[in-house]
Image: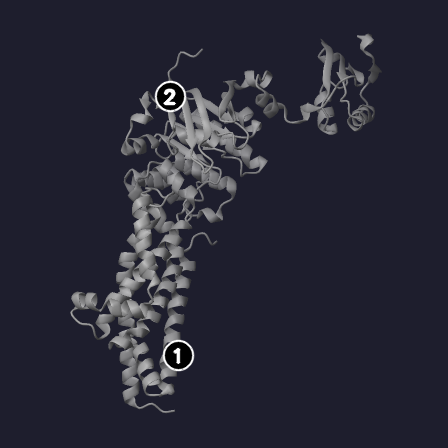
Amino acid sequence: MEQRKPIIRLEHLGKEFPTADGPVKALEDINLDIYSGEIFGIIGLSGAGKSTLVRCINYLEVPTEGDVIFEGVSLKSLNRKGINQMRRSMGMIFQQFNLLSQRTVLKNVCFPMELQKVPKKQAEARARELLELVGLGDREGAYPAQLSGGQKQRVAIARALATNPKVLLCDEATSALDPNTTKSILQLLKEINGKMGVTIIVITHEMGVIEAICDRVAIIDSSHIAEAGNVSDIFSGPKSAIGRQLIMGNTVHAEFGHSKLVRIIFDGRASKEPVLANLILACKAPVNIMYAATSDVNGTAMGQMIIQLPDEEGEEKRIMNYLATAGILHEEVTEHDF
Amino acid sequence: MIFDSGTWEMLKTGIWETLYMVGLSSLISYLIGIPLGILLTVTGKDGIRPIPFLQGILGVVINLLRAVPFIILLIMLLPVTKALVGTTVGSVAIIPPLVIAAAPYIARMVESSFREVDAGVIEAAKSMGAGTFQIIWKVLLPEAKPSLLVGAAISITTILGYSAMAGFVGGGGLGAIAINYGYYRYETGVMFLTAAILVIIVQLVQEVMMKLSIKTDRRIR
């Protein structure tokens, strides 16, 4: 599909952990190409192996099978020094931020440059620049304990970018944050990707994160990749069971069977509000769209839709009540009516 | 009870000798104990440079030394002391056994301080390409500093306690005075006074170290 050369290629990657009950496979036969400049998501339920996978990419975990190719270089072929050199081209941020608690914000951002023996003045200038970029220019003298979770993650992002890495690995970077902070951190990551062209790999268990910033996604389930592709493709038609579960949630297991059918009539009045979405959210129950036809008449949506209600009495009642109280035109129909 | 000027002179010398013995042995013990503690942590099974074989041997040696009661170690080490400082009596003669008893103890204290350092922070340093020595020097030591200071207060107090046994090998210090007067001469007044001075020294060491630890700990707002 793509003509570009991948910046990271995972080839038949596998990782086995020895345990008391024999070896456990955390990853098996993982093949992925990640291209320069994209935001790539890796999603899975906890225990699926996604954290191990991201740690294999920078060799914090050494794969037991297969190889990681970074910019055409096989990581397997590198010695300890080479691995450390490679890691300087890959920044990483974590769920728990992992800042040095005894260093100020400024000194935390200077840390990776200190490791590379960048002169102090130069390092501090760069650190200030980055703190400005992440919106913490006024907090350089603070210690991590004085910052909120979102601020800590911003410092961690500045720190990870200090050495101008080509790749930024994000391991559940927003999982410890509240929804609003998550949004702003994702926004920042997207901004950095656009401004600096850093390839970003995002590990998460939240579909919302993938939806918000990722170009492509791989869904990982019990040590394997269940499916991978463009986010829009996967969202519109997940092929794997785990994909469907992650995208639609657990509610879609409702039985429909021979349950009630309802025709909803759109008379133009409701064109500005998402009638069906509101209904599903308000009633916390799924509906099955059997038939829908709308036409645009002078800028208003006119038409009808036949939905099937869940087979469960409580949910059915809730939906009927909602339709009545919301003033949505509707009528009960049978299969022969359409 | 009234003490003559000779008693005060003796106590003054005792305080000086105690501080000298404890200070010097603490210093040397830490010079040996910190590297040992680092080695124990770093070479451990989930350390940053696992060498389980080396860590195992080190662990056994340290446990052996720690298992021998100090008073017995003191006697067992007489030939070593003679070889090291040329004498087996006096305040200097207590320093080698004090160091040999305290260094393993300190190594364990240091090890436990290092284990308190957040594994995530070490992983972050690794992810930035930090080498083993950089992690020790720039992550483990500074991050563990508050805990190391608390450990030092405990270790120095323990060394002070051990130093009281110097009296048995003709060493000086407050412990020796307390034993000689209280135990051999039944002068309980002098004994209680020296004990009181020892209590004050312990309090001071403890207070200063704890204050230092809290004051320099940046985790506390």
Decide if residue A220 is on the left or right side of residue A312.
left
Decide if residue A149 is on the left or right side of residue A69.
right
In this picture, is A331 found above or below A80?
above
Give the distance between the C-alpha atoms of the residues marked 2 and 1, in whole angstroms: 71 Å
In this picture, is A315 found above or below A259?
below
Kindly state the secondary structure of the residue where label 1 is placed: helix
The chain containing the residue under callout 2 comes to A
Question: For residue A131, what is the image quadrant?
Answer: top left
- Residue A163 spot, x, y in % from top left: 34, 33
- Pointer 2: what residue? A7
Disc 1 crowd, CA 10 A, few/some/many (<14, 14-19, 20+): few
Question: For residue B7, what is the image quadrant?
Answer: bottom left
A8 vs A215, nearest the viewer: A8
Give the amino acid type for the residue marked by disc 1 in the picture: Ala
Kindly state the secondary structure of the residue where label 2 is placed: strand
The C terminus of chain A lies in quadrant: top right
The N terminus of chain A lies in quadrant: top left
